[in-house]
Amino acid sequence: MNLILLGPPGAGKGTQAKFICKKYDIPHISTGEMFRKNIAEKTYLGMLVKEYTDKGNLVPDHITIKIVDERIRETDCKKGFLLDGFPRTITQAEALDTLLKKYNLVINRVLFIAVSNEVVIERNVGRRVCSSCGASFHIRFNPSRLLNKCDYCLGELTQREDDTISALNNRLAVYKLQTKPLIAYYRSNKLLSKIDGACSAEIVFQNIETALGHY
Ligand code: AMP
């Protein structure tokens, strides 16, 4: 089963991606994670994309499409995959259609997790991520047991560069302008399931399971 997770920053895509990939046994392909990993490892790609991700701007389409093309050809994707944070522009969606055709694949469902702007801001600005293992916390909704220390590995909790209020406002503007049109794109393809993302993570996942039905 090949899936796309769509939604604004802070919709809970990362959390749901983990639940989905575990239950359906498919790899999680997060372009944001791939970029962050490359930045942390100071690779050529990482250095290339850092100026975009830090400000909350989109990485140019040709770079993003190339890394997705390479990733979906890896053997673990034979059993299916979940794309999280890709596509984010109509150009990327069209490029994905071309790739899928080339590899004889289809997207089975696009899960659009909908949340209001207020929820997005509250979730993102309070998010803290372990600089060691990547575990995610929230200062209000899911605080770590020790202040600024990860529950799992005691690593330092930090705020993502792009979770600051100025970067976040930019990410929201970018989302509205460039990513929101994908809702109509996938609705017209009859692939879209809209999921209310304001409920608890468990309820959101139950609604996703219902939307995926027999898979
Ligand atoms: P995310 O973790 O999905 O919020 O992504 C973090 C950042 O990575 C975004 O703000 C963009 O700068 C970059 N990024 C992730 N996915 C894409 C994409 N599909 N197209 C362009 N830039 C992306």
Image: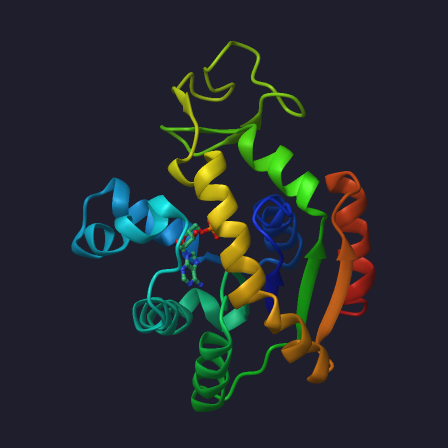
| Residue ID at (51%, 67%) | 178
Q: Quadrant of the C terminus?
A: bottom right
Where's the N terminus, which quadrant?
A: bottom right
* Residue 122 horizontal/vertical position (percent): 63, 33
Q: Is residue 162 left or right of residue 13?
A: left
Q: Is residue 90 visible?
A: yes
Colouring scheme, one of rainbow, by chain, secondary structure, one colour: rainbow
Q: In the figure, residue 198 lies in which quadrant?
A: top right
Q: Position of residue 61 (x, y in %)?
A: 36, 71
Q: Image point 63% across, 45% down: which residue?
A: 12
In the image, 176 versus 66, the foreground residue is 176
Q: Is residue 46 above or below residue 82?
A: above
Ligand 1 is located in which of the four quadrants? Answer: bottom left
Q: Is residue 145 above or below residue 169?
A: above
Residue 168 horizontal/vertical position (percent): 50, 43
* Rendered position, 153 above or below 53: above
State whether residue 208 is above or below residue 108.
above
Q: Residue at x 27, y 40 (%)?
A: 40
**Residue in front for this viewpoint, 66 or 8:** 8
Along the line of sight, which residue is nearer the eye, 158 or 23? 158
x and y, in percent, of residue 107 in the image: 60, 77
